[in-house]
């Protein structure tokens, strides 16, 4: 598998729920920020259904998860975190959501975008599937074409071309990043999501992530990796 370290700067992650980036890409993010890359998080939903507590206040949960995501991002050296605030489990593949993503792409103008692979088969969270597919549509053709959402031109949000896309959660990985030196930081960042973790489960989660990272790097010369499906976009 090719080692795909040539991810051009800046980098944007489009993330369905607070904690998805830490589970799937935090080792890579930490590696990039250490190398001076500018990384931006865009979180699509507020995660307000991520609890098994029947007495939970959803507004309070969303606020808590936003703070947890900010803490994790700050630990990883992410420069900016944007919350789109859609309710958990209620994303739709519609023009409004697509336009919002085009707005983020044209504002921050990332050369590299990381998001979730929408084409993973069952079971797959609806917010993951929809975030992934709408991000890909937003990159091509909507962010590229000046006649798509022409009203954005009035805000100086001119067309933008993304060069590379990396999809996590993929069944078809074709590249892997070495996270051997950032794996511990990934765990620390994941621990910021306290609303999603029971303290007793931590050893089990660490073990699961460790096995996953070893499996991802099985064909590589390094021990721990995060794998993605990488797409080079030729414009
Ligand atoms: Zn998720």
Image (cartoon, rainbow, N blue to C red):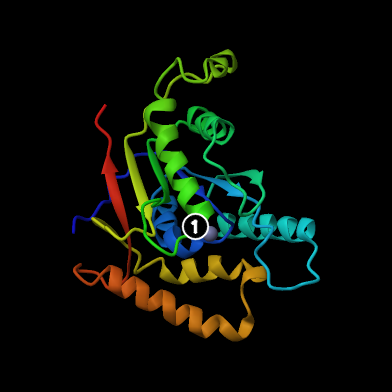
Give coordinates of residue 145: x percent, y percent.
Answer: 41, 19
The local crowd at label 1, few if under 14, some if 14 to 19, many if 20 or more residues have their Cα within 10 Å, is many
181 vs 36: above or below: below
Furthest residue to the front?
Answer: 122
Q: Could you say which quadrant of the image residue 62 lies in?
A: bottom right
Which residue is painted at 52% across and 50% down in the image? Answer: 15
Q: Could you say which quadrant of the image residue 80 lies in?
A: top right
The answer to whether any part of residue 48 appears in the image is: yes
Which residue is painted at 57% across and 16% down in the image? Answer: 151
User: Could you say whether the residue bearing mark 1 is in a helix, strand or loop?
Assistant: helix
The answer to whether any part of residue 11 appears in the image is: no
Which residue is painted at 43% across and 21% down in the image? Answer: 159
Give coordinates of residue 195: x percent, y percent.
Answer: 67, 69
State whether label 1 is within 8 Å of ligand 1.
no
Residue pointed to by mark 1: 21
Quarter of the image containing the N terminus? bottom left
Give coordinates of residue 64: x percent, y percent.
Answer: 72, 60
**Image position of 53 (left or right of 136):** right
180 vs 58: above or below: below
**Image position of 2 (left or right of 122):** left
Q: Nearer the viewer, residue 147 or 8?
A: 147
Quarter of the image containing the C terminus? top left
């Amino acid at each position: 598998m090719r080692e795909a370290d040539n991810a051009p700067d800046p980098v944007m992650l489009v993330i369905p729920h607070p904690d998805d980036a830490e589970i799937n890409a935090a080792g890579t993010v930490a590696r990039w920020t250490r190398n001076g890359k500018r990384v931006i998080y865009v979180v699509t939903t507020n995660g307000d259904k991520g609890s098994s507590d029947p007495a939970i206040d959803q507004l309070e949960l969303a606020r808590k998860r936003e703070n947890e995501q900010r803490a994790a991002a700050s630990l990883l050296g992410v420069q900016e975190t944007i919350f789109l605030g859609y309710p958990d489990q209620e994303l739709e593949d519609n023009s409004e959501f697509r336009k919002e993503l085009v707005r983020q792409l044209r504002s921050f103008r990332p050369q590299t975008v990381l998001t979730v692979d929408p084409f993973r088969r069952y079971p797959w969270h609806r917010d993951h599937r929809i975030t992934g597919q709408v991000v890909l549509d937003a990159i091509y053709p909507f962010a590229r074409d000046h006649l798509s959402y022409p009203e954005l031109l009035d805000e100086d949000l001119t067309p933008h071309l993304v060069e590379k896309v990396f999809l996590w959660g993929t069944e078809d990985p074709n590249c892997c990043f070495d996270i051997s030196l950032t794996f511990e930081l990934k765990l620390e960042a994941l621990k910021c999501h306290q609303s999603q973790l029971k303290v007793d489960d931590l050893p089990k989660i660490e073990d699961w992530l460790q096995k996953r990272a070893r499996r991802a790097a099985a064909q590589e010369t390094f021990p721990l990796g995060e794998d993605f499906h990488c797409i080079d976009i030729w414009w």
